Image (cartoon, rainbow, N blue to C red):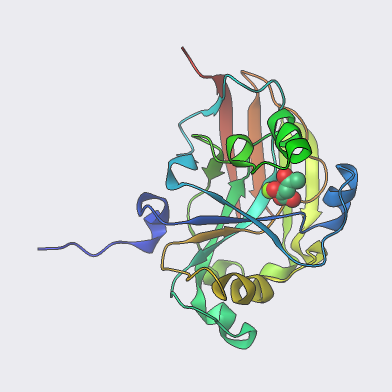
Amino acid sequence: MATARNISRFWEWGRKIICVGRNYADHAKELKNAVPTEPILFLKPPSAYVKEGSPILVPLYTSDLHHEVELGVVIGKGGTSIPQADAMEHVAGYALCLDMTARDIQDQCKSKGLPWTMAKAFNTSCPVSEFIPKENIPDPSDVKLWLKVNDQLRQSGCTSQMIFSIPFLISYISDFITLEEGDLILTGTPKGVSAVQEHDELQAGIEDVLTMTFKVNRLEL
Ligand SMILES: CC(=O)CC(=O)C(=O)O
Ligand SMILES: [Mg+2]
């Protein structure tokens, strides 16, 4: 007999992780990128997930691994071409996420016109919190996100600074990628991204809703 799957363990479902880049003007500017007029999207595989208690593993090929704290939106009801007005009905809840990025590799890919896969989609590139039920964040367009490295504040932003809103993103993405229950949308990072090293401790939070902690380790050969 099939057992019912629980959305609160969405990271175990093998669903898509769809990431939005440069959705905060202050972050686009700190990396000297143009502020986008349309969403910039990329994907991570489900093998990118890592949960508290397990470390973030620095890939052997990078010497500049960056943290990016982001609000994740967990899809509860799938759909294609979802109208913006209906978009929030498709949201089951949220998660605090890190979009770990090998910045040196991303810069190389950008200069060669290559995709960002090696920079963004490696194992443990998506540390994720517990599932946050929708009711616990009544207004996702106005929540504060922060991240500390070894107790030093590096990122502090508010989702009100997003260029493209959550309903817009859900509608935009679903026009060409069918959204499924258990998919996760990473909504972009505010300014303050910086490098992490082996043995660092990252702590991140969403207002008074939740905090999470991850250690950074080097991948053993
Ligand atoms: C420049 C980036 O890495 C884009 C990105 O992921 C973001 O959150 O912005
Ligand atoms: Mg990002």
Among the 4 quarters of the image, the one containing residue 102: top right
Among the 4 quarters of the image, the one containing residue 83: bottom right
- Residue drawn at the location 64% of the way across and 56% of the way down: 71
Near-viewer residue (55 or 17): 17
Quadrant (top left, top right, bottom left, bottom right) of the N terminus: bottom left
Among the 4 quarters of the image, the one containing residue 186: bottom right
- Residue drawn at the location 81% of the way across and 57% of the way down: 24
Q: Residue furthest left?
A: 1
Give the answer, above or below, for where 166 lies relative to 157.
below
**Left or right of 4 on screen, residue 47:** right
User: Residue 89 at x, y = what percent?
Assistant: 52, 81
Q: Is residue 146 visible?
A: no
Q: Is residue 201 visible?
A: yes
- Residue drawn at the location 52% of the way across and 68% of the way down: 177
Near-viewer residue (145 or 75): 75
User: Residue 69 at x, y = what percent?
Assistant: 68, 46
Give the answer, above or below, for where 20 lies relative to 152.
below
Near-viewer residue (30 or 158): 30
User: Residue 85 at x, y = what percent?
Assistant: 63, 87
**Left or right of 26 on screen, residue 151:** left
Give the answer, above or below, for where 115 lies relative to 102.
below
- Residue drawn at the location 80% of the way across and 53% of the way down: 157
User: Residue 135 at x, y = what percent?
Assistant: 54, 72
